[in-house]
Amino acid sequence: MDNPDRTIKLCFSIFYNDGVFLKAIYYILAKHDTFFVEGTYCFYPDFNSPDPRDHFLGIEFASGFDDPEWTVYVPEKVCFAYAKKACERFLELHPEQKYRDFLNQILDNWQPLGVDEFPAEYHPLE
């Protein structure tokens, strides 16, 4: 898909509607870890996985089950920009200081993990 906008926004909307938005932001931005609810995913690559489908650059967002129309790969900074925008919207709906403190701590300390390039020691599976 050329335009990741609808898929990424849908993923964050589903995380919010399922009541796991804060947990999703923590996993995606603070832990640099995969997060999903049934049918909606945000994947980090795993270059040590024996499954070659886990070897990709950037962050994968997907909604649905193996639907290429709803699967996108974006650089980490694009993921962060969408997550930040989603956090801003969350704080419009939930302006309580405890949420503001939690999200600002994550956003202010975010650093890219470096998954936009293959690691130097990476060898593709044959």
Image (cartoon, grey):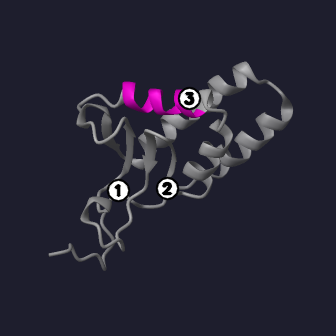
Q: Of the residues under marks 2 and 3, which one precedes in the sequence?
A: 3
Residues tagged 2 and 3 counted as in contact (Cβ below 8 A) = no
Residue 81 percent coordinates (x, y): 50, 36
Judge whether residue 10 is colored magenta.
yes
The residue where tag 3 is placed is 85
Q: Main secondary structure of the magenta part?
A: helix
- Magenta stretch, residue numbers: 6-15
Between 33 and 92, the one lying in front of the other is 33
Instruction: Name which residue lies at 77% across and 34% down.
Output: 100
The answer to which quarter of the image holds residue 111 is bottom right
Residue 17 percent coordinates (x, y): 61, 27
Instruction: Name which residue lies at 36% across and 74% down.
Output: 48
Q: Which dot marks residue 116?
A: 1
Residues tagged 1 and 2 counted as in contact (Cβ below 8 A) = yes
Q: Amino acid at mark 3?
A: Lys
Label 1's element?
Answer: loop
Q: Of the residues under marks 1 and 3, which one precedes in the sequence?
A: 3
Q: Which dot marks residue 101?
A: none
Between 70 and 108, the one lying in front of the other is 70
Residue 57 percent coordinates (x, y): 31, 56
User: How packed is label 2: few (under 14 Cα within 10 Å), some, or many (20 or more)?
Assistant: some
Q: Is residue 119 left or right of residue 81?
A: left
Q: Amino acid at mark 1?
A: Asp
Between 21 and 2, the one lying in front of the other is 21
32 up-or-down from 97: above or below: below
Label 2's element?
Answer: loop
Quarter placement of the C terminus: bottom left
Q: Which dot marks residue 112?
A: 2
Q: Amino acid at mark 2?
A: Pro
User: How packed is label 1: few (under 14 Cα within 10 Å), some, or many (20 or more)?
Assistant: some
Label 3's element?
Answer: helix
Q: CA distance from mark 1 to mark 2?
A: 9 Å
